[in-house]
Image (cartoon, grey):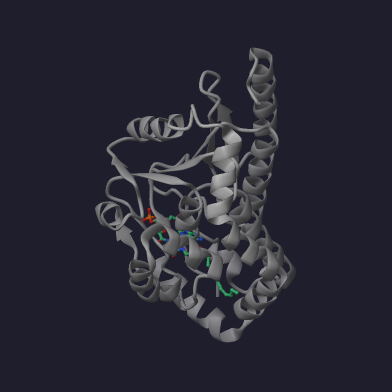
Amino acid sequence: MAFRTARNLAYFSNYIRNYSTNGPLVNVTVNEKSGFATATLQRPSVNSLNLELLTEISHTLQQLEKNKCRGLILTSASNKVFSAGLDLFELHKPNADKIKQMWSTLQEVWIKLYGSSYPTVAVVNGHAPAGGCMLALSCEYRVMLNNFIIGLNEAQIGFSAPMWLIDGMRNTIGSRQAEFALTAGTLFKTEEALKIGLVDEVAQSKEEAIEKAEKFLNKFAKIPPHARSMTKAALRGANIQALVRNKDEEVRSYVDFVTDSQFQDSLGEFIELNLKQKLSK
Ligand SMILES: CC/C=C\C/C=C\CCCC/C=C/C(=O)SCCNC(=O)CCNC(=O)[C@H](O)C(C)(C)COP(=O)(O)OP(=O)(O)OC[C@H]1O[C@@H](n2cnc3c(N)ncnc32)[C@H](O)[C@@H]1OP(=O)(O)O
């Protein structure tokens, strides 16, 4: 088992430190006492998910799995935005090869995070629309700070969330609430998200949120890790397998969908209406 000896722990911590120096978009630190890793997203200014950030998240998750991480806290370096979701500027008039890779890496991130063997908590210390909500949903527990928004607003932008993300929402808040939320593309304020179970706890500060996250992770201290991860796999495996089977087909439909002129027009309108930065004409 990982971290059985101080030497193992020291090795892992050094390894992670070395790794984090190579990853400017995701900073990883390990609490040497608890063995919990904190991965902090730090792509300025809103952690929008472009290919580079998604690739780094995916590599981080792979390394944590390989090193038998004891628990992960996923959070943001920004005190306003957890993640603004997919980088909308990179979806506008895109290079087909790049968005193909982007979608495939997004699927990998979901598979690795939703299916991780170790326990995971999102400390949602800022807004989390769309892909930001996706990252939070793929964790096992969510602690959110007050006065932010979270939800899957894809319908408002002009598309449907993919099946695996719908599954994640349904498994978290139930079918009825998921149908209401997804068809309207609702973004929930923190307190509303707590009421429907989209987040598990509310905190007043990041420090308090980290404490709550660690308390959740500590619940598993006496549970044999293999029993915990087998149970998680039994609960989440069917959804993950469904995506694995359909991965390539979904990438093809996504690229067709995003490169279509109708989608490009509605994305252009969404950006002009909702984002401060505008498109260059
Ligand atoms: C088979 C499948 C086929 C088809 C399916 C197709 C697609 C399914 C995709 C499903 C999965 C995920 C989808 C997504 O993630 S889409 C992204 C949706 N994101 C949003 O709607 C968020 C938009 N942003 C906001 O609402 C606000 O910016 C936010 C996050 C609440 C923060 O607000 P605020 O603090 O006021 O900050 P600003 O608005 O001033 O923004 C600061 C800065 O960031 C830029 N920005 C914001 N969001 C994005 C983004 N998503 N991408 C790129 N850039 C973003 C913004 O323009 C500002 O830039 P500036 O240069 O002015 O600083």
Residue 260 seen: yes
Q: Nearer the viewer, residue 11 or 5?
A: 5
Q: Is residue 199 left or right of residue 115?
A: left
Residue 84 seen: no
* Residue 127 position in % (x across, y down): 38, 52
Q: Nearer the viewer, residue 220 or 3?
A: 220
* Residue 23 position in % (x across, y down): 66, 38
Q: Nearer the viewer, residue 235 or 41?
A: 235
Looking at the rendered image, the quarter that the N terminus falls into is top right
- The quarter of the displayed image where residue 225 is located: top right
Q: Is residue 66 left or right of residue 113?
A: right
Q: Is residue 180 left or right of residue 71?
A: left
* Residue 227 position in % (x across, y down): 57, 38
Looking at the rendered image, the quarter that the C terminus falls into is bottom right
Residue at image point 33% right, 67% down: 177
Residue at image point 47% right, 39% down: 77
11 over 201 or under it: above or below: above
Toward the top, the furthest residue is 6
Q: How many marks?
A: 0
* Residue 44 position in % (x across, y down): 52, 47
Residue at image point 44% right, 60% down: 171
Toward the bottom, the furthest residue is 262
